[in-house]
Image (cartoon, rainbow, N blue to C red):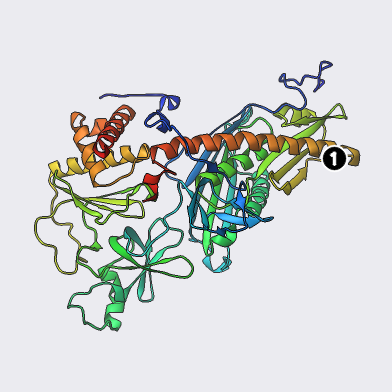
Amino acid sequence: MNISISLASKKTRHGILKPTSNPPVIFTPGEKIRDEAGFMRGHGTYVSAGSLKATVAGVEQNINRLVTVSPLRCRYNGEIGDVVIGRITELVHKRWKVDLNARLDAVLLLTSIQLPGGELRRRGMEDEQSMRNYLSEGDLISAEVHSIFADGSLSLHMRSLKYGKLGQGVLIKVQSSLIKRSKNHFHNLTVGISIILGNNGYIWIEPTSNDNKDLVGLEDEFEQVVDIGDRQTISRVRNVILALSYYKMLIYDTSIQFALEESKKYTVSDLLTAEACYDIANLTRHRLQIMDE
Amino acid sequence: MDLLSRQGLRTDGRRSDELRRISCKMGVFNQPDGSAYLEQGNTKVLAAVYGPHEIRVNRSKAPNDCAVINCQYSMATFSRSERKRRPRDNKSAELTVHLKQAMTTAIKTDLYPKSQIDIFVEVLQSDGGNYSVCVNAATLALIDAGIAMEEFVISCTSSLANGEVPLVDISHLEETLGGPSITVAILPISGKIAMLETSQRMHINHVEPVLTEAMRGCRYIYDTLNKTIKKHYEEIGGALNWGTEEYNI
């Protein structure tokens, strides 16, 4: 067995990957951004003594007269239409509470899921009593943000065949800011693995299923055995995504695909070492840069 | 034993108005939302911030219009020269309350209704000014977590040597041998005081010079930490194309 030990101080810094030629101006909490006159106060700012000041550490962003400061890292702030992955935390009257790594738990109403028996079914008492049969505490789901309540919590829906309960696979958690927003968040990788990139920073990796999913997608699918090759590939994808996230690189289909191709020379367990992570992140960044040019 | 030699040097070789070496690192953990490691001289502290997140316990007691702030101060059993039996004792409970008081003044809690923010600080090595270093580390961790604050909260401890000379940023030796000490936590830009405490009775004539010295120390610490934060953000943000055209799509 190989044992590798390295000092914490030897860990590579993120700056090594991409030296910043002209770093943006960074404001820290309490620093004055500009005079208030003629500007509007946005997120991450407050007004004090006639000037706009930052409340978080970040760069200034202007949309016409609106001044906002966005932090580099914070909890997930939902937007309508986002694809999210969450875990059921509790069942309350006619709704499930879902943990999304956001400030507040989201709600999933009984009326916003598709029950067996088609679209036009009334939800009666029996459905309410058998909610735990559909989804119970600890279950993972993929869903879409339906609306945002006044207090900032989210309402979800699963009224589409692509959303539903998640069966066998691996969940990884990254910062929500690292997930690139794109048209499609469901990807089938060429290696026979499907991934769902949740906008809230949760990523689901599962083997690609060939047979069509049943209409509802609320049944457990734990009988099916995932073969060893698929499991190894899933672990490889997981390690590669974690390497990208350690070096703060955006995670989307192309970057994952490139990183997977670069990772071929390592075994799955070697991908956990700091050197391999650095190498993969570095090579992926080069390839992405070349593609951009 | 004299705390200040005739040449005006302290036992560790500093001058009376000199602070200890400060080094810090942000984002040391992956699991919490924000974390920081701060060293001031030989005092070493780790801070972790979780939240804002859904309130899990005592939900009925929680206020409806602002965030609940939950602090925990603890000292590692190996942090002092004599091994401690418990990491959290009565003294820690007191400091926890003070820490909560100081952090609450700066965090904009009204932006996070029905949520909870947890702040955990752990003293890894204790060499005087533990509370001050914990406040500073907690501030760094909160900034790393992207939690909205009015300003930094910066704290510093100072004391009196030979009954006349104010000493800034005192070490453990000066804490135990020296006279009364003042711990102050301020919001350095506006100069507001978030927390003020004296270790024992103090003559009224001494309060002002010692307090002035402590606040000067706070502003120095603020400048140092501010620089480190900006450097950290430039490094991390550079990898993300942060603040550039590419990032804003």
Measured along the vertical axis of the image, is residue A107 above or below residue A177?
A: below
- Label 1: how many Cα within 10 Å (few below 14, some 14–19, many 20+): some
The chain letter for the residue carrying disc 1 is B
Q: Quick one: which residue is furthest to the left in this view?
A: A211
Measured along the vertical axis of the image, is residue B52 above or below residue A252?
A: below
Q: Quadrant of the N terminus of chain B?
A: top right
Asked if one can make out residue A253 in the rendered structure from this viewpoint, the answer is yes
Measured along the vertical axis of the image, is residue A11 above or below residue B122?
A: above
Q: Position of residue A207 (x, y in %)?
A: 16, 50
Residue at point 56%, 41% (across, down): B140
Asked if one can make out residue A175 in the rendered structure from this viewpoint, the answer is no
Q: Position of residue A136 (x, y in %)?
A: 30, 65
Residue at point 61%, 46% (across, down): A31
Q: Position of residue B138 (x, y in %)?
A: 58, 43
The amino acid marked with disc number 1 is Val
What residue did someone put label 1 on?
B207
In terms of depth relative to the viewer, which is nearer, B95 or B33?
B33
Give the side of residue A35 with respect to residue A195, left or right. Answer: right
In terms of depth relative to the viewer, which is nearer, B169 or B227?
B227
User: Hey, which quadrant is residue A121 in on the image?
Assistant: bottom left
Residue at point 60%, 56% (across, down): A46
Give the side of residue A226 with respect to residue B62, left or right. Answer: left
Residue at point 36%, 65% (across, down): A80
User: Hey, which quadrant is residue A104 in on the image?
Assistant: bottom left
In terms of depth relative to the viewer, which is nearer, B3 or A258?
A258
